[in-house]
Each structure stands twice: as C-alpha cells, then as structure tokens.
Image: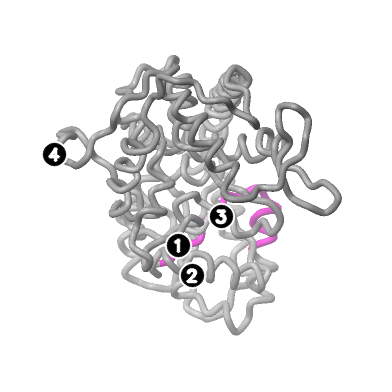
C-alpha cells in the first residue's frame, strides 16, 4: 500500500482542484494509518480502513461507505484527506504494488530496477521505502507536521472507526524519520520520477472516483431508502424468511441499511455472522437511530421498538412496526409498494 509521503503527495495533487488547507489535508490523509501508534487494545486497521468484510479475497477498502457516512464533513480537509487515503490505498494495492512485489519460483520478493529478483531480507523494502519517502518529501516540500492539538486551533476530527490516540505518534514518526533529504540515496527498487508519474495517475483516478461517488449519492436521492433496526428483530430464530425478504428488497432496487447500537468494535464479528446467515444488505451502521435517519434522509424505518417508531413518525419518516419476531416478504411488500407510488417519498433529496 502507499506510504505516508506518497499519501501526502497524492492528496496535494488532488487538492489542486479543491484548494483546501494543505496542512489539515496532510494530517487527514495520514490519519488512517495512526492505528499503528495506538495502544494495543484499540489497534484495528480493519476499522480505520473501512474494510469490507464481505469480500474474502484481496483487500477491499469501502471508501464508498466512508463517503456516504461522512459526506457532510467533507468540506473539512481532515475528513477529505482521510477519504483520499482510502481511495489511494485501494488504487496502490490494485495497480502499483503488483509491479514490484512478485512471486518467482514460489518465493515472494521484489523486482529491482536492474531486472534482478530480491527476497526481502532484513527489511530491505522498508529501508528502500524510507529513502523514497525522504526524496518525495523534498520534491513536494513536505515539512514538519504539528506535534499536538495546541498547534491546531482549527482542528476538528471525530471518526468512529479510528481512535485518535495514535495520531500524534504517527505525526511524530513522520517528523522524525521522513523529513526531506538533501542527498538522493540510490534506490534499487523504485525510480523517483516513475513514482511521481504513478502519484499523478493515482490522483487522476481519485478525482474521477470522487465524481462517481457524487453521482452515486445523487442517484440514492431517487431510491427508497430503508433502515432496519436489527437490535430488535429476532432474525436469529427465523433467518431464512428474513434472508428471503432482504433479497426481495434488494432485487426491487431499494437501499437497505442495518442499524445497530452495538459497539463498532464488533463490526467484523457481526458482519461475519450476518454473512453466515445470508442476510444481504448495503450498509451496517453503528449509530444513534434518530440522528442517522434524519441526517441521511431515510424514507422508511422498520422496527419493533415503539419509541423509535414514534420518534421517526414525528420526523415524517414512514415506519413499519413489526410486533412479531418474524420477518416475511408478504408482510412488507404491500406497504413498500404503496410507498413506491408516492412521489413525495421517492423525491426526497439528500442535502
């Protein structure tokens, strides 16, 4: 995956179209990797990188999930930088890393610039990466980053998926180990100019993806958006009927989100459980129900908690109360099909 200075360089290239505060943008785009500097009990790369646990092979960072969840904060350069990091990681992992890391005769190693093959002994690639990052810091004039919040009066950043305790350790590591180098040490794996070209390619990809994400978000404004509170549905006993109903919802083109009040640290285990039960959906949200429904303009709440139903109704959100523990398509279909015909539901815009 891309390293810290590559992330910063990509963010600066993307920012040429946005003109956000560069310092805050740089902090945001290295923030996802600050899990490394967090205390052991809160380290979780999979959360900080929005890992899609439904994909078993290969690394998949669901930057679409981040985009939809934090869209309203993207004018804040820290959040925007965070999004760029996730997109850059996916691009680098898919298109760039395979150019260098290879399997030769059953052995994993790296292709050097002279064409030879080298097994990664004694952190060879890591040391090469440090040299490269110092040179990139010089090219892009990447100076020191702040040491504490006292240096950032305008800093505002709260990502549920990231414990910020490790951020300052990450910034200190960059300041200590990756400052601009006046001497260009010889690189055996990477070519500096070639990496800069790849940075431009990555930034072009991200700019295009940002347009695609915006279009995706706008398309959702014409889609019936359904939130299902899974904390109060007894899908454990009758998962088969629930699974069939969900598949019908998705087949109809509805946007289905599961809501849960469980701690986000359970995301991996809960997603694994839902997948084992073949319960299909678009997103799993760990958030307060009322805030989430209003902020993202959901059209329908399906629940069997009367308090949630009452509060959603007050906000003019359509509701379906399930008093039983079962979830059948024949119970849900007539109601949703009626809503489908009501233009005032389908035309609610995401703003």
Up-down relation of residue 201 to residue 307 (above or below): above
| Cα separation between marks 4 and 1 | 36 Å
Which mark lies nearer to you, 4 or 3?
A: 4
Mark number, residue 12: none
In the image, 345 versus 66, the foreground residue is 66
Disc 4 or 2, which lies upstream in sequence? 4
| Cα separation between marks 3 and 2 | 12 Å
In the image, 157 versus 41, the foreground residue is 41
- Where residue 321 appears, as percent x and y from the top left, is 46, 69
- Where residue 83 appears, as percent x and y from the top left, is 45, 37
Q: Are marks 1 and 2 in contact (CB under 8 Å)?
A: yes
The span picked out in magenta is 246-260
Write down the residue under mark 3: 256
Label 2 environment density (alpha carbons within 10 Å; few <14, some 14–19, many ≥20)? some
Q: Are marks 4 and 3 in contact (CB under 8 Å)?
A: no
Q: Is residue 250 magenta?
A: yes
Up-down relation of residue 223 to residue 292 (above or below): above
Which mark lies nearer to you, 4 or 2?
A: 4
Which quarter of the figure has residue 289?
bottom left
| Cα separation between marks 1 and 2 | 6 Å
Indicate the secondary structure of the residue bearing disc 3.
Answer: strand
Q: Residue at x 56, y 59 (%)?
A: 335
Mark number, residue 150: 4
Left or right: residue 22 compared with residue 86:
left
Write down the residue under mark 1: 259
Disc 4 or 1, which lies upstream in sequence? 4
Q: How is the image coloured?
A: one colour
């Amino acid at each position: 995956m891309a390293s810290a200075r590559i992330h910063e360089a990509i963010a600066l290239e993307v920012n040429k179209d946005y003109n956000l505060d560069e310092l805050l943008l740089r902090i945001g785009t290295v923030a996802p990797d600050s899990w490394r500097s967090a205390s052991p009990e809160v380290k979780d790369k999979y959360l900080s990188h929005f890992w899609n646990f439904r994909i078993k092979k290969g690394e998949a960072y669901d930057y679409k999930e981040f985009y939809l969840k934090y869209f309203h904060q993207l004018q804040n350069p820290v959040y925007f930088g965070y999004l760029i990091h996730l997109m850059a990681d996916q691009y680098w992992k898919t298109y760039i890393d395979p150019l260098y890391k290879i399997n030769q005769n059953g052995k994993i190693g790296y292709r050097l610039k002279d064409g030879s093959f080298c097994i990664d002994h004694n952190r060879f690639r890591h040391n090469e990466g440090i040299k490269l990052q110092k040179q990139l810091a010089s090219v892009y004039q990447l100076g020191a980053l702040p040491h504490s919040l006292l240096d950032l009066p305008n800093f505002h950043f709260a990502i549920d998926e990231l414990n910020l305790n490790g951020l300052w350790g990450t910034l200190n590591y960059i300041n200590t180990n990756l400052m601009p180098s006046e001497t260009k040490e010889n690189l055996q794996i990477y070519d500096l100019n070639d990496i800069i070209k790849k940075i431009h390619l990555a930034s072009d990809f991200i700019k295009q993806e940002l347009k695609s994400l915006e279009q995706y978000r706008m398309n959702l404004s014409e889609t019936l958006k359904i939130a299902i509170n899974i904390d109060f549905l007894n899908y454990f006993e009758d998962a088969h009927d629930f699974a069939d109903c969900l598949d019908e919802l998705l087949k109809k083109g509805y946007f289905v989100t599961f809501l849960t009040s469980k701690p986000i640290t359970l995301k991996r285990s809960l997603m694994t459980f839902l997948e084992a039960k073949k319960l299909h959906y678009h997103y799993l949200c760990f958030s307060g129900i009322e805030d989430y429904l209003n902020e993202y303009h959901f059209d329908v709440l399906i629940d069997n908690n009367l308090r949630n139903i009452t509060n959603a109704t007050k906000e003019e959100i359509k509701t379906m109360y399930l008093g039983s523990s079962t979830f059948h398509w024949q119970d849900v279909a007539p109601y949703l099909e009626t809503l489908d015909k009501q233009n005032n539901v389908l035309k609610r815009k995401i703003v």
